[in-house]
Amino acid sequence: MTDLLALGNWRLNGACDGRGVAPLAEALWEGNGMGSCGVVRRPSTVKDEDDRFFEEPTPSTSKKAQALSPYMNRKPGAGESYEPTHFEHLANVGTHGVGIIPSILAFYYIIDASHRDLQYMLMVIYGIFTTMLFSASTLYHYYEMIYRPLKQKQRLRYYLHICDRAVIYLFIAASYTPWLTLRHCGYPGLNLKWMIWVFAILGILYQYNFHEKYKTLETILYVLVATIPSVAMFTMNDRSGLELMMAGGVVYIMGVIFFKLDGVVPFAHAIWHVHVLLGSAVHTYAVYVSLIGPDHLNPVPDVYAPVSSPEPAPPSSHEAIYNHFKAIFPELPPKDEPLRSGDYYSLEQIENFLRSVAKLHKETTKLLQVGTSEEGRQILGIQFGVNPANPYVVIDSGIHAREWTAIHVAYFLVEQYSNGLSEGDLQVRALVDAFNIVIIPVLNPDGFSFTWDADEQPFKHRLWRKNRSPKRCTAEGRCCEGVDLNRNWDLAFSASQDPCSDVYAGPSPFSASETRTYSRWLRTLPALEAYIALHSHGQLWLYPYAYAQNTYTRNVERTIYVAQKAIDAIYAYNGTRYGHATPADALYTSTGSSMDWVERELEPEFAYTIEVRPVTQEYGFILEKDLLLPASKEIAIGINVVLTEAMGFRQTPFRFTGSTPKPQKHILEQRDPPVDEPLDENWMKWLNDN
């Protein structure tokens, strides 16, 4: 016995099989102080100075808690802590240690795949806390394996345990943040994307003050913090990737079961670790395939991504642009041939079409002139419904000359309502009986006509955006024509200094004839139910305001509710996903826009700007003709949902019981958005040189 104590410095308690003392081989078996027959051994080491800071939690030393096998001790009694076996310690270290390198590699890949600054920042947050989760857990369990049997380093192990639990809260918050930030959510998401970090901080404070005191409550807190934010994810406008997130969540929940089964299931805590490892892998994959990169819905079409280099592109790229234009540029049908949707048409053809529809339905429609252009052209629209007692719905497009797809959508709407009246369509008849619907296909006739330049190089001005107001010059002598008509309205107007910018707002509000005369006509309307501005491109259903972030209209709850219903109807029709947000929140701040002015000055029940197809592509303003009809049909479906909902609200007022974002009164500093201006200039220079 003396030799045995000298070899192992152990004090042996109990007996085995009536022999009084276990054999030397059993006594030396390193089972975290447990002999193979249940003998409890405690090392008689001296505590160091750190160990005196905290007393070791009461171990499960009762007969009830003696070892069942080398792979599991008995379940601890009340007030006792579970004593893992040596093999359980090894498993606890290994099951999270194997996740460190993969988490670092995943960190690298999601950072590399990030398409813009917001994605990059969110992936940094997500990657850091995912790696910390596995690193902190591995470090803590390693120190437990080495020093717990020796009853040393109590202070260090105590704080490592707190850090291990604290990182779990931070990991939960970091897992939700990319989804609630890069996806447009309903009201739960607006608040929960910052509240989850508050929950994480409160959880860490709880750990610091009540560590290991109320274990059941601690588990409940973890489950609540991990599950409550998931409610917001079901309000996302784009739910792609949600199935993977749910699958990962199920894996986590299954793991929580094992979290509480120490002493019941061998390696229970290690099994919990495996579930965390698998769940985080599923969630990381969902983030990688659904949230990052240029080709996903949310939050920003990459046409607005900053141009990486101001250097002109090589001539070969301009030649590719030229050839792309040429490949899809429409051949004009004979002027006496009736127009059919699914093609691009000139200003003259569209205006003739409006006149023919007004002539066909004399009793229910009328041709309108809503304004005059800088070059003296009429801005024409057509009104469906002629009851002066009905409120008005105004739909305009073509405020930016190059957005031919949006103009086609407006043309398609005119065609659909005209055909509906001819065929007795009940929905069209109900809408026309309820509203006076005015559709203005080309709000910028001068600019649109300019994009149809019929010189020897007919594509030279295809990407022209502004109107054709007279040249203005900078102090340096640069002179350019045109004003961006969607920056020229008198709300939060911000005068631009560079007339050669694609977003030049003009010298003063309503300095352009188009905005000045059109706004006067809008003021003549006795009641405006809805205003819808059609643009391209981006697949976004936008609502006020554009001039400042986190700034919303007075009836934002109803506005978002109807927008979501329109988006859901489009998705149900053909699977096309649209996002919804304010322009400032989803794209960039822009002052002097038509939607903002109409919302503030005329107070319609609904005001939207719709960015039609595509989400993004290299030539997004030049949609192939075979996609025009699908793009137009889906927008028509969405708009009809808006008008149908508006009819319903006139009968039953909308009621909302959630929280309302409060508009901010300040105006953010305005900067020109990073549009593709260098591309236009270089492209036109190449054409001039060739």
Image (tube, rainbow, N blue to C red):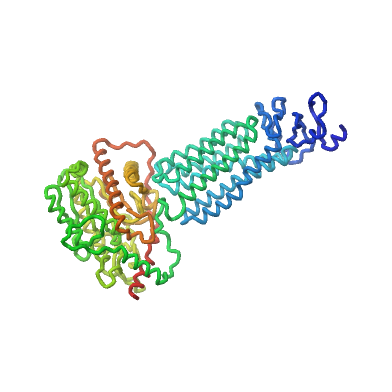
User: What residue is shown at x 46% (from left), y 50% (from top)?
Assistant: 291
Q: Quadrant of the N terminus?
A: top right
Is 573 on the left or on the right of 381, as rendered?
A: right
Residue 554 location, x and y as percent?
32, 44
**Residue at the outermost bottom position:** 689
Residue 284 image position (x, y, % from top left): 52, 47
Along the line of sight, the residue nearer the viewer: 154 or 367:
367
Q: Is residue 35 left or right of residue 329?
A: right
Q: Quadrant of residue 647?
A: top left
Judge whether residue 557 can be spotted in this image.
Answer: yes
How many marks on residues? 0
Against 271, residue 551 (above or below) is: below
- Residue 554 seen from this side: no
Q: Toward the viewer: 606 or 641?
A: 641
Q: Quadrant of the C terminus?
A: bottom left
Image-based side of 424 in relation to 543, left or right = left
- The x and y percentages for residue 546 are 35, 53
- Across and down, in percent, residue 100 comes to 61, 48
Query: Which of the 4 image quadrants contains residue 627?
Result: bottom left
Q: Nearer the viewer, residue 352 or 320?
A: 320
Between 478 and 268, the residue placed more toward the observer is 268
